[in-house]
Image (spheres, rainbow, N blue to C red):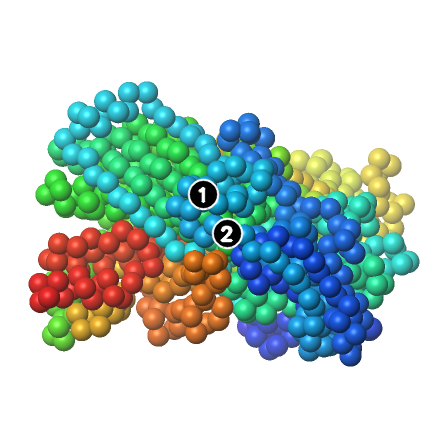
């Protein structure tokens, strides 16, 4: 690991120390789900629907069970599991609850939906068993597009959702807004669509499940962001007590939100393990991931904004339709995308009047789950296009229009009833522009015939959603708090539990830094325990950039409590007042004229308990919880992007990318930079490359990486990152979340840069991913 180094002020927080995970992960000693092999283990494969919409008239597994190596095969009736149902506490006109069966029965609703599970001694035999299964389907008219869903000309996807609308909510409607539009100097409109994407974690979904007769417990090892939610759903579906389900998460290769919902295949595999009393492993292959895994991002915005003659925004009116696919995900429901967009679309701008309608429609496609950013890449793109379009129509500089409308006084209570805590919205824009100007980009020209364009995007990211913020969505399952327990051992090292979960964010390091500072020990003396429902009291997992803001604050609070115990014990042993005792920053307590090392205090707490005060029990452990009151905290950033368009091919090359980010206090600056760079890569992917498409029968047209275009290192530019720091006033370390910001800003920055390059063509593009044919046509418009 090298020699740990602290910041100059002597703190671990803020130091880019060597990551504690790296020696294990970089030398191939990590342990992922597919690395787990148990005696007598069976391998699972799923029989999947070949139709997008059909009545399921028969499932015959007789031949499948005769395949050599196949041990068993089950359909929905064989497993007898309850359905997965996510709920909102909203009236029927706003929300239509729909159930997702673990295995389809009676009806299939997308191509790739699991119908039966085959268990065999090796994965090849399991696949052979799948091929031998006979499934009879009576095709129904598939609903494949938003227009078809809302037209409701054919059979509904769900009988419980007439009109194929799962969510229809108008959160805000300022009185008199039509009059504002009628009297405005300028009204601009943007209609934008964003393509359906796959989050593409490097490690696909997977599970190894085993029934333990001694403990009467189903042990489920799976790569999930929400282990306690998996436990709850599995217990309910299988009719078990929650204590009879233990969910553990080994090392995990990415999640990006796709794994923060409960999947069906994991439940089915665990149920089969219990039924057979043998371990069962299922590893999702990439074709399954691309066609039957949870998808995201397919959204349609029609937005207009009213502006004064000098560029001040007066009103915003938006209609948002999100294609959520065949089912509502648990626990967030199909409302996750339209509710997020509706609540936060004003973003970093002072919008005095606002009206919005958000709808989630159901179609015969694979269902949608959150994906890094959750609607914010889309609505930020729309807001930034509105700013650009207004500037063009008014003859103003687009950055000056932004500056006129950015929130600059904090705390700021928005028209969306959200209070924004202090940020650096204007400062980040100014710095981003200055960096690009100092690099000389506005004045550069290319001598190869390509056309340059520069684009910007300003945005905020609400992070650290507490229970109150989630409750505003009226979810029946309300995430928010985190609980942390810390225990000191005899050698003075500590173990700290957290209900959050790392899937690449370096929690083993960053959480250790937080705790180490609170106790005054080396961060290498702190072990972070995560991803085990038997060891963690309760946890909501990792999503929405909540880990350091909420989980880190809970861990810090637990460490402070332990420090108080150590001071009290030292005071008792030294015979001094506890108020005169303090942690010495070097693994001990100063008590009067004595310094008692933690090891000496732990020796008394465990091995010589007769020396403890009469009202103090043995051991050194503390538990604390943390929840964010109010509306959470807001990170912010400005992205600047320089592109070159090739008139000969319609190709786009990103020449330069600058990110000015403010996530409050950065616990580990290099980790923050890594999060930003990875997020920007995913945002660029959505802007230029990735899209899941379907034919008119609902068959997926991107089942492999030959069709689903994933950018490589050759397409992702070097990213310059500049840090600003506006500490949060109510998290333990002044930190704000940093997990999603890179993704949020990139599509808007790229799209604005491309439109800047197209300025002389009279063409403006508002949807992503950008099609090379459209760019070629625009660049060659005059020639044609």
Residue 4 in which image quadrant: bottom right
On screen, residue 593 versus residue 333, left or right, reads: right
**Which residue in the structure is indicated by mark 1?**
153
- Residue in front for this viewpoint, 677 or 485: 677
- Residue in front for this viewpoint, 676 or 707: 707
Q: Residue at x 14, y 45 (%)?
A: 392
Q: Which residue is drawn at 24% across and 62% down?
A: 774
Relative image position of residue 169 (x, y in whole percent): 45, 32
As helix, strand or loop, the secondary structure at mark 1 comes to loop
Residue 746 in which image quadrant: bottom left
**Which residue in the structure is indicated by mark 2?**
141
- Residue in front for this viewpoint, 650 or 405: 650
The answer to whether residue 410 of the structure is visible from this angle is yes
As helix, strand or loop, the secondary structure at mark 2 comes to loop
On screen, residue 210 versus residue 97, left or right, reads: right
On screen, residue 549 versus residue 315, left or right, reads: right
Mark 2: few/some/many CA within 10 Å (<14, 14-19, 20+): some
Q: Residue at x 27, y 56 (%)?
A: 751
Quadrant of the rendering where the C terminus is positioned: bottom left
């Amino acid at each position: 690991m090298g020699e740990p180094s602290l910041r100059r002020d002597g703190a671990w927080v803020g130091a880019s120390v060597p990551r504690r995970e790296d020696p294990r992960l970089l030398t191939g000693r990590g342990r992922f789900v597919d690395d787990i092999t148990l005696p007598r283990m069976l391998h699972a494969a799923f029989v999947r629907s070949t139709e997008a919409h059909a009545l399921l008239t028969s499932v015959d597994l007789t031949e499948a069970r005769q395949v050599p190596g196949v041990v068993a095969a089950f359909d929905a009736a064989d497993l007898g599991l309850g359905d997965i149902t996510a709920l909102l506490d909203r009236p029927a006109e706003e929300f239509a609850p729909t159930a997702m069966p673990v295995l389809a029965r009676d009806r299939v609703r997308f191509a790739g939906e699991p119908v039966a599970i085959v268990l065999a001694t090796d994965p090849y035999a399991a696949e052979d068993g799948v091929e031998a299964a006979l499934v009879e389907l009576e095709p129904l008219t598939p609903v494949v597009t938003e227009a078809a869903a809302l037209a409701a000309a054919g059979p509904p996807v769900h009988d419980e959702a007439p009109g194929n609308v799962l969510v229809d909510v108008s959160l805000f409607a300022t009185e008199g807004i039509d009059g504002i539009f009628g009297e405005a100097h300028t009204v601009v409109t943007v209609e934008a669509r964003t393509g359906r994407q796959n989050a593409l974690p490097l490690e696909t979904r997977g599970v190894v499940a085993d029934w333990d007769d001694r403990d009467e417990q189903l042990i489920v090892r799976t790569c999930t962001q929400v282990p306690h939610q998996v436990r709850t759903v599995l217990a309910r579906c299988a009719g078990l007590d929650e204590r009879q389900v233990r969910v553990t998460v080994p090392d995990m290769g990415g999640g990006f939100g796709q794994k923060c919902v409960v999947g069906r295949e994991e439940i089915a595999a665990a149920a089969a393990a219990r039924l057979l009393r043998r371990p069962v492993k299922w590893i999702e292959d990439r074709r399954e991931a691309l066609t039957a895994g949870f998808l995201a991002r397919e959204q349609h915005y029609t937005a207009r904004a009213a502006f004064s003659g000098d560029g001040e925004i007066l009103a915003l009116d938006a209609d948002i339709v999100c294609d959520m696919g065949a089912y509502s995900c648990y626990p967030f429901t199909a409302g996750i995308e339209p509710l997020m967009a509706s609540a936060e679309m004003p973003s970093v701008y002072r919008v005095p009047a606002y009206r919005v309608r958000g709808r989630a429609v159901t179609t015969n496609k694979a269902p949608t789950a959150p994906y890094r950013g959750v609607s914010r890449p889309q609505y930020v793109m729309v807001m930034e296009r509105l700013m650009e379009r207004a500037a063009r129509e008014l003859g103003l500089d687009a950055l000056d229009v932004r500056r006129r409308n950015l929130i600059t006084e904090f705390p700021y209570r928005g028209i969306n009833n959200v209070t924004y805590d202090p940020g650096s919205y204007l400062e980040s824009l100014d710095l981003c522009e200055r960096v690009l100007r100092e690099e000389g980009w506005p004045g550069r020209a290319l001598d190869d015939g390509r056309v340059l364009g520069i684009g910007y995007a300003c945005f905020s990211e609400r992070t650290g959603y507490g229970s109150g913020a989630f409750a505003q969505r009226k979810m029946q399952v309300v995430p928010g708090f985190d609980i942390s327990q810390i225990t000191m051992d005899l050698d003075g090292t500590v173990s700290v539990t957290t209900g959050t979960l790392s899937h690449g964010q370096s929690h083993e390091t960053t959480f250790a830094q937080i705790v180490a500072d609170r106790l005054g020990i080396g961060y290498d003396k702190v072990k972070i325990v995560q991803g085990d429902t038997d060891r963690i009291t309760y946890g909501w997992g990792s999503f929405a950039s909540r880990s350091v803001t909420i989980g880190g604050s809970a861990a810090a609070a637990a460490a402070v409590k332990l420090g108080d115990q150590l001071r009290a014990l030292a005071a008792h042993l030294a015979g001094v007042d506890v108020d005169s005792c303090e942690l010495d920053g070097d693994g001990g307590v100063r008590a009067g004229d004595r310094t008692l090392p933690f090891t000496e205090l732990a020796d008394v707490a465990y091995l010589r308990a007769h020396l403890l005060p009469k009202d103090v029990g043995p051991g050194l452990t503390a538990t604390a919880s943390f929840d964010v009151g109010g509306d959470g905290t807001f990170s912010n950033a400005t992205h600047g992007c320089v592109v070159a368009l090739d008139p000969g091919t319609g190709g786009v090359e990103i020449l330069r990318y600058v990110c000015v980010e403010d996530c409050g206090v950065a616990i580990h600056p290099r980790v923050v930079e890594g999060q930003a760079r990875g997020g920007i890569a995913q945002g660029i992917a959505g802007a230029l490359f990735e899209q899941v498409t379907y034919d008119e029968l609902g068959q997926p047209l991107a089942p492999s990486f030959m069709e689903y275009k994933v950018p490589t290192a050759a397409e992702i530019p070097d990213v310059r990152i500049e840090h600003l720091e506006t500490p949060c006033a109510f998290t333990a370390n002044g930190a704000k979340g940093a997990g999603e910001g890179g993704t949020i800003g990139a599509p808007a920055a790229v799209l604005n840069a491309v439109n800047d390059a197209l300025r002389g063509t009279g063409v403006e593009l508002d949807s992503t991913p950008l099609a090379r044919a459209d760019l070629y046509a625009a660049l060659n418009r005059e020639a044609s």
